Every structure is written in structure tokens, then in C-alpha cells.
Amino acid sequence: MKISDILQHTKRSVSFEFFPPKTPEGEDSLFRTIKDLEFIKPTFVSVTYGAGGSTRERTIRIVKKIHTETKLTVMAHQTCIGHTKNEIVDILKEYRNIGVQNVLALRGDIPEGQKESFVFPPDGCRYANELVSLIRENFGDWFSIGVAAYPEGHPESPDLDTDIFYFKKKVDAGAEFAITQMFFDNRYFYNFVEKVQKVGIDIPIIPGIMPVTNFKQIKKFADMCGATIPKELIEKIQPVADRPEEVEKIGIEYAVKQCEDLLKHGVKGLHFYTLNKSKATIQIYNQIKDLI
Ligand code: FAD
């Protein structure tokens, strides 16, 4: 099923993001997580892609396995950086051939240390809007296409308005919904939605929720993607930073409050960054399910 069609007929979407594990044990553990989460009947689940093609085989295999062995609607993330257009079309043909109809079209991060010197291949896509166009040119309406959105602006962008200008290019090229980068202060999300509506963007924008279960790890992710961790959350976590269970408890409580507020503001859905684990997501879901 196409996610764009499901979103039209669903009051609220709940979805989960997974990454393709490196080992058979990791893969078994992921499929246990998927089984644990199935009772929630997610609108869709998605599988990330290693920019530059590092997870090409693994992402394709996991997407195919979810599509063929579960009842879940699956979306493949596809980055364009480091790939030629032909390579991308070949990957997407594999998905079309087995009936997968959803793709999250991304550029991918420029490799570490190459921000200034990176040369985009002439036969590739420089930005995600070009990838969206490539998919539409080659596959017409077969795929429902999602894109990334950044409530605090993308780290390479000089300011939020410039980033929104380029976000609109992705929508104009044919993106039908967006999932946001993680954020911990909902005010960034509300401000972003207000701004994008003013420039005529009316696709569903689904907030990405990252429950804090390991402070060091989340701090690293947040630094990389430019997400602000509110002082209030840092002050709660820092005194217990060496006690993982307490960190997780605080992280879950925080995410529940964040989701409740988003749901009260009428968001179209919630996309959970699960890091391939089910515990935190289930605990959050159980506390907010009446609002969904
Ligand atoms: P773009 O939309 O191309 O934007 C990149 C930057 O360039 C922005 O600063 C933008 O303002 C600017 N820009 C855009 N178009 C133009 C243009 N035409 N001219 C000049 N400037 C322009 N990464 C992975 O490697 N694998 C994943 O699976 C993955 N999944 C993600 C899922 C979500 C929900 C999100 C939010 C991010 C994900 N990422 C993933 C991270 C993403 O690849 C990085 O944030 C990357 O740096 C930007 O990708 P993008 O698609 O947003 O790029």
C-alpha cells in the first residue's frame, strides 16, 4: 500500500524506523522487535540506508523480508549521495519488482571531513529534490515518496527560511509527505509547520520522535543533526547519567509528554526512531494510545 493513500484515510499514523543490522544475530533481534511492535498495528515501518551505499544489500534484504514475511507496509530509505542515477534506478527497480511502493528520498550526509571538498558525481543527484524528480521520471506514480524535514533547519543551511525554500523544491518535485528530524522542544515543530504552510506546503509532516534511552548516544546524534536538547531535560538526566534505568525512565516520561502535546495539537502522526528496540516505544505508546 502507498503511505500517501493510507495517510489520507487514517486519522493518526504511528510508524517505526529501523536500521539494517550488520550481523545475523542483529537481524534476529530486529525481527523480534518487529514482532513485539506488531500489536500496535503501525501505519508503516521504514528501513534506513547507509549514505554512499554502505548498507545497500542489507537495506534491500530487510525491506524485502518485512514486505514478504510480515503484514506491515514498509518504506525503504534511499539516499543519493555517492550513487549514480543508474545505480539508484536499479535499486528502486528491485523494490518495484516485489511490490514495495514507498520510498523516503534523501540526499544523505556529506562524508565526515569533506564538507568543503566533496565533489558530487556529474551523473548523480546533488540534492534530494533531484532524487524525487529522478524517481518520478523513471517510475511515474508507482512510489509514494516521502522526504526529510528539519524543524530546527538542516545543519548546512544558513537559516530556517533557506532550508524551507529547498524543502518546497522537494514537495514541488513530487514528495507527498515528510518525516522530521528528531527534536525535543515542540515549539520548533509548531513554528516550522506555521512557516511551511505560509509558503504553500500542505503535505502531511510527521514528527520524528527519539526517546532518550542513552544520554551519550542521543547527545551525539543531536549534535550531529543540530537538534537542541532542552536545558530542562539535560538537568533531569545529568545527575543520573551513569544509571541507565533512570535515564531511560526520564527519557520515556519526557517523550510521553512531548507526544501528548503533539497529539493535542492535531499532528497527523508520530514516527518513532526505535534504534531496533521495542521497550521504550511500547511504554510510550501504552501511555498515549487513548489520544491516538
Ligand atoms: P536535502 O533536502 O537535499 O538538503 C540538504 C541540504 O542542502 C540542506 O541544507 C538544504 O537546505 C540544502 N539544499 C537542498 N536542495 C538544495 C538545492 N537545490 N540547492 C542548494 N541547496 C540545497 N541519512 C542517511 O544516510 N540514511 C538514512 O536512512 C536517513 N534517514 C533519514 C530519515 C529522516 C526522517 C531524516 C530527517 C533524515 C535522515 N537521514 C538519513 C539524514 C539525511 O540524509 C541528512 O540530514 C542529509 O544531510 C540531508 O538529507 P536531505 O534529504 O534532507 O537533503
Image: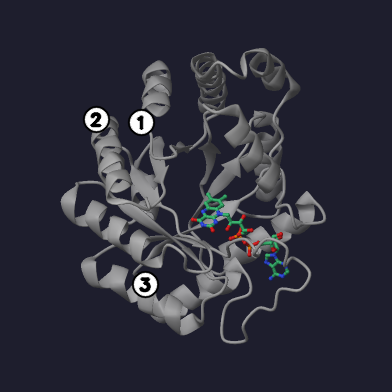
Q: Name the residue under label 2.
A: 39
Q: Which comes before the other along the chain, label 2 or label 1?
A: 2
Other-residue count near label 1 (Cα within 10 Å), few / some / many at <14 / 14–19 / ≥20: some
Q: Position of residue 71 (x, y in %)?
A: 19, 46
Residue 240 circle label: none
Up the image or down, 282 lies above or below 142; here it is above
Label 2 secondary element: helix
Q: Mark 1 points at which residue?
A: 278
Label 3 secondary element: helix
* Front-most of residues 26 and 108: 26
Q: Name which quarter of the figure residue 141 lies in.
A: bottom left
Residue lying farthest bottom?
122
Amino acid at dot 3: Leu
Amino acid at dot 2: Phe
Q: Position of residue 192 (x, y in %)?
A: 69, 42
The span from disc 3 to disc 1 (Cα, nearest Å) is 29 Å
Q: Position of residue 280 (x, y in %)?
A: 42, 25
Q: Mark 3 points at which residue?
A: 92
Label 1 secondary element: loop
Q: Which comes before the other along the chain, label 3 or label 2?
A: 2
